Image: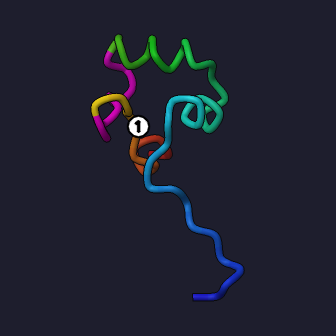
Amino acid sequence: MPASSTMKPLYLDLPAVATTLSLSVATVQKLVRESKFPKPRLLSDRRVAWLTRDVEA
């Protein structure tokens, strides 16, 4: 693999999801509550994130 290639992160936190989708954090949270967007995955007791592939799908 060339050294110049960049890899996408496996997980995105809430601010990164909002930025990727050009939405506000509050809008992403609302869409999750309304089941219009996938729920985040629990990474640890205090951290959740979305799989990048789920956000970009």
Q: In this picture, which residue range is highlighted in magenta?
A: 35-44
Question: In the rendered image of this protein, does residue 57 appear above or below residue 41?
Answer: below
Which residue is at the front of the view, 22 or 5?
5
Which secondary structure class fits the magenta region best? loop
Image location of residue 7, percent across then percent down: 57, 67
Question: In the rendered image of this protein, does residue 11 appear above or below residue 42?
Answer: below
Which residue is at the front of the view, 43 or 17?
43
Q: Is 47 covered by the magenta stretch?
A: no
Q: Residue furthest bottom?
A: 1
Image location of residue 15, percent across then percent down: 59, 30
**Residue 33, quarter of picture:** top left
Residue at image location 41% in from the left, 37% down from the top? 49
Describe the element under mark 1 as helix, strand or loop: strand
Q: Is residue 30 left or right of residue 18?
A: left
Q: Is 38 covered by the magenta stretch?
A: yes
Image location of residue 48, percent across then percent down: 37, 33
Residue at image location 64% in from the left, 70% down from the top? 6
Amino acid beneath label 1 = Ala
Question: In the rendered image of this protein, does residue 18 appear above or below residue 53?
Answer: above
Check disc 1 and report the residue beneath it.
49
Q: Quick one: quadrant of the N terminus?
A: bottom right
Residue at image location 35% in from the left, 11% down from the top? 34
